[in-house]
Amino acid sequence: MKNVSRRRFLAQSSALASVAFIPNLWNYNEDFPSGPRKIGPNEKVNLALCGIGFQGGDISKRFFQSGLCNVVALCDVDMGAPHTQELIKMFPDVPRFQDFRQMFDKMGNKIDAVTAGVPDFSHFPIAMLAMSLGKHVYSEKPMAHTFHEVELMMKAEKKYGVVTQMGNQGHSEANYFQFKAWKEAGIIKDVTAVTAHMNSARRWHNFPASYQKGFPPKEPVPATMDWDTWLGTEQQHDYCKDFVNGQWRCWYDFGMGALGDWGAHIIDTIHEFLDLGLPYEINMKRADQHNPFFYPLSSTIEFKFPERADMPPLVITWYDGINNIPPVPAGYGNVALDPNIPPPSNGAIQPSKLNPGKIIYSKELTFKGGSHGSTLSIIPEEKAKEMAPKLPEVPKSPSNHYANFLLSCRGDEKPRSPFSIAGPLSQVFCLGVIAQQLNAELKFDRKKKEITNNKTANQLLVGAKPRKEWEQFYKL
């Protein structure tokens, strides 16, 4: 930011110092006026880890195992929780913080890149502050909690010249390279419809009926937890165990439901290589036990995309819920578990149901696919045998998703799922979540990026106003 903007930023923040810690961005910007530090070709990336339990802990270990980084800071709002102890024991001498703002203020000049392995609604402030300070960012999926936040993150990526990556690992695995090769060879063409599905049980399927009428009752905040920092940009909520440790995904106020969780692993290559961009219409076809607080037990959502260049209009229909199995075509084959698909966070995928995945319908061929790194197959089997001699050779991935990010920070590779690519995909999910929340049909203007038929839905593109001390992050 320009110096005057930094001064204004700090001036606006000073009045809030009693309720929120504000990093000394002005001094930091003087030390590093030229953006990201240039990292040598054989140098390790100095990586700060935000969120060190559950999924955040898993990606932290994967980054470290790549051998391409030095872990220089640990940050988590609950350093005393059982799920954070493994990482703390791995890095006993690494500085620890409960507030990422304090981490950047104390250690900004020692950090090259940061991870955001935290709840969906917390990706945005960490990523925006990091990018404004010239730090590369790896954010878990989906990128952010609202359409507007994703828009700001894409602009910041370009403005600050940093490397970014969203955590949809399939973008560095076999699925990515196969889809790309098949599309370029003309095997995948003239796609008109996609069925995408994730039909395993979700955490909110076991919620009591009372949660459909209001948030759960207040509970004591754990002594080791910084609840105010956990809330971040979100308006005040009383602590409850059903808001934290993965439960946040259940609630509209904090997470993005099954669509935001698994959509990035199922629809990602379809969205990128078929140049889908944003839909012009989103329709709720099913919303079992719809309520204003948490996600439906089953959802069917239809996304309509227009004609693009030489590609026909396309409809993606999303199915979630254990009793909302989509129809499958003749010759689909068995539903044996795919070892390339990780289980959902609340248990194993049931083999009697469909694996999470997709069915892609083109004018000539039908493809069956899974999630994450799982590759496509042509169905039925007879057609697959006929097409086998025509299939192109698929190159192998030169690096996994975590190594790709770190190598990109050094300038050795280009990130495969930067915010510029992952952003529009995440915005598709944001539109789907608005349709779920309102149980509505939405008309979307792709050029103006506005919902034209529902004023409330259009306001939800921006979402609820952040708490006063967090408004600054929307101005970076």
Image (spheres, grey):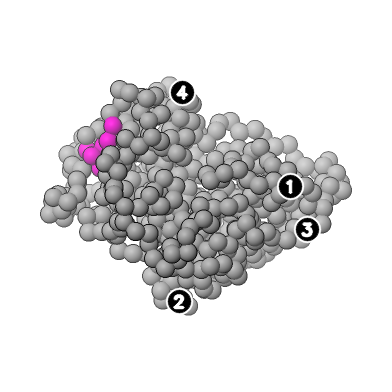
Choose mark 4 or mark 3, whichever is in front. Answer: 3
Q: Nearer the viewer, residue 74 or 336?
A: 336
Residue corresponding to mark 3: 329
Q: Cα distance, mark 4 to mark 3?
A: 45 Å
Q: Nearer the viewer, residue 283 or 324?
A: 324
Crowding near the residue tagged with mark 4, few <14, some 14–19, many ≥20 C-alpha atoms within 10 Å? few
Q: Cα distance, mark 2 to mark 3?
A: 35 Å
Residue positioned 69% across, 60% down in the render: 326
Q: Cα distance, mark 3 to mark 1?
A: 13 Å
Q: Cα distance, mark 1 to mark 4?
A: 37 Å
On residue 335, the disc is 1
Secondary structure at numbered mark 2:
loop
On residue 454, the disc is 2
**Which comes before the other along the chain, label 3 or label 1?**
3
Q: Position of residue 256 (x, y in %)?
A: 47, 56
Residue positioned 45% across, 53% down in the render: 249
Look at the image and give the residue range highlighted in magenta: 96-105
| Residue type beneath disc 3 | Pro
Q: Position of residue 187 (x, y in %)?
A: 74, 49
